[in-house]
Image (spheres, rainbow, N blue to C red):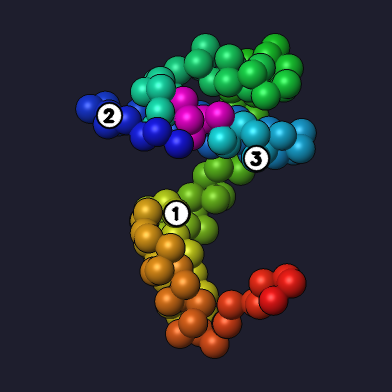
Amino acid sequence: MPFRGSDKLYNSRLAQELGLWSESKNRGDAFHAAVFRAYFVDGKNIASIPVLVELASSVQLPADEAARVLATGALKRAVDADWALSKEKSITAVPTFILNRDRVVGAQPYEALEELLQVNGIQRAPHKGS
C-alpha cells in the first residue's frame, strides 16, 4: 500500500464505532481496510461522518444505517468498554501485540513480531510441501 505522509491527525473515535457495527454485519475486515486506506493513502478525514458513511457504502454496507449508527451513538458504550480494557491492559498504541507478559507496540518490522513469538516458545510452522 503506498503510504503518503500526512500533516493532519483525525480523531478515529467515530470510525471505531462504525467499525464495530461493520463487524456485526460481517464486513469488518473490508471496512477497516477501507478506513486504513482512506487515512493513510488518500489522506481523508476519518472523523467526518460523510466520509465514514461513504466508506461504509463502498464496502456494501447500507449508507442510511451507517449514518444512523453514527448519529445515535449506538455503539458509543461498546467503544468506551474497548478503551477501558485497553487502559486496563496498558495499551497506548495500535497495533499492540501481547503474548504472555511480552508485547510489541506500534508499527514494527516483521522481525519484531517473529522475536515475540520465538521468546515465547512458538516456532514457525514448516511450509507446506517442505
Inspect the image, locate mark 1, and give the three-letter code of the amino acid beneath it.
Pro
Of the residues under marks 3 and 2, which one precedes in the sequence? 2
Label 2 secondary element = loop
**Residue lying at 48% horizontally and 50% vertically, measured from the top left:** 83
Label 1 secondary element = loop
Percent coordinates x, y for residue 79 in the rendering: 55, 42
Q: Quadrant of residue 96?
A: bottom left
User: Residues in magenta?
Assistant: 34-38
Residue topped by disc 1:
95
Percent coordinates x, y for residue 64 in the rendering: 70, 12
Residue 34 vertical position relative to residue 104 in the rendered view, above or below = above
Q: Residues within 10 Å of mark 1 (few under 14, many from 20)?
A: few
Inspect the image, locate mark 2, and give the three-letter code of the amino acid beneath it.
Ser
Residue topped by disc 2:
6
Residue topped by disc 3:
29
Viewer-closest of 49 and 118: 118
Locate the C terminus by quadrant.
bottom right
Percent coordinates x, y for residue 30 in the rendering: 65, 34
Of the residues under marks 1 and 3, which one precedes in the sequence? 3
From this viewpoint, is residue 17 visible?
no
Answer whether residue 84 is magenta in the image: no
Viewer-closest of 8 and 86: 8
**In the image, 48: left or right of 10?**
right
